[in-house]
Amino acid sequence: MVSYPSLLLVGFLLGWSVAWPPGPINAEIARRASSGRFRSGLAVLAGASSGDAIWALGVSLGIGVLFSGPTARLIMGGVSIALLLALAFLFLRGAWAAFSAREAPAPAKARVDGPGGAYALGMAMALTSPWNVAFWLAAMGRPELAGVDAAHLLAMAGAVIAGALTWGILWALFNKAVHGALDGAARRWWTILVEAATGALMLYFAWGSAMRLLAER
């Protein structure tokens, strides 16, 4: 039987390693935290972690396999791409609004910018990614975990989420510090850069997702 300490350590390191590479959720956390909405960025992180927890629970109970088939992956991928394109439009529009303004604009009042909307957005981004369930199936279906009971699997899943949360909090704090160091015109141009770059990243991620889906057909 695999020990709890080893599972927790491996899970934490795995969660950290998969959380830090650039992705839609990291981009959205950075966009919010670097524009003075640190709590909103944390809400996105909390929502994404909740989505991960749902996938982890489903995989532990054997339900995740139902969502790994080609049809399910195609549907989920389509929803994820649509969400990324919608976000890209919103962010690029925000960049244009900031560019058109003479001063740094006030935070947007869109529904997804509030804590509740940010949490829902983070969860939606995690739940609709077909590669998220693939990650959980790979992480918890490793040969050394064969025969491990559900309690041990859930403990490892919790450690993975803890690792991802730790990275996400540090990432949000870093972007908050960047925002705090700016003022006046610098903050306005920073807003333009962040909104435009995040919008471009969302388009890039949507394109990459579409290409991966086409390659799997």
Image (spheres, grey):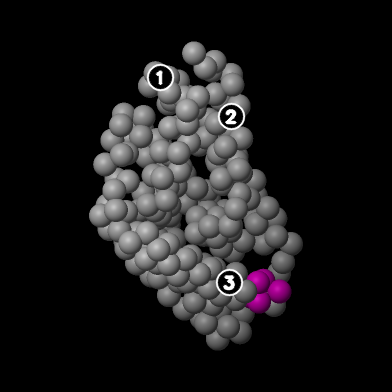
Q: CA distance from mark 2 to mark 3?
A: 33 Å
Query: Which of the two labelled residues, at mark 1 and mark 2, occupies the earlier sequence position?
Result: 2
Question: Mark 1, mark 3: which one is toward the viewer?
Answer: 1
At label 1, which amino acid type do we have?
A: Gly
Q: Which residue is mark 3?
A: 197
Please give the name of the residue rendered at 42% of the width and 19% of the height, measured from the top-left corner: 148
Mark 1 Cα shell of 10 Å, populated few (<14), some (14-19), many (≥20): few
Return the residue at label 1.
Answer: 147
Residue at 55% over, 60% down: 27
Q: Which residue is mark 2?
A: 10
Q: Is residue 137 left or right of residue 195?
A: left
Residue located farthest toward the right when viewing the structure as drawn = 181
First to last magenta residue range: 186-191
- The residues tagged by marks 1 and 2 sit, at their Cα atoms, a distance apart of 17 Å
Q: Give left or right: position of 82 versus 203.
A: left
> Depth-wise, is mark 1 or mark 2 nearer the camera?
1
- Sequence order check, earlier mark of 1 and 3: 1
Q: Position of residue 26 (x, y in %)?
A: 55, 55
Toward which corner of the image does residue 35 lie, by quadrant? Answer: bottom right
SS at circle 1: loop
Q: Residues within 10 Å of mark 3 (few under 14, many from 20)?
A: some
Residue 133 marker: none
Q: Earlier in the sequence, mark 2 or mark 3?
A: 2
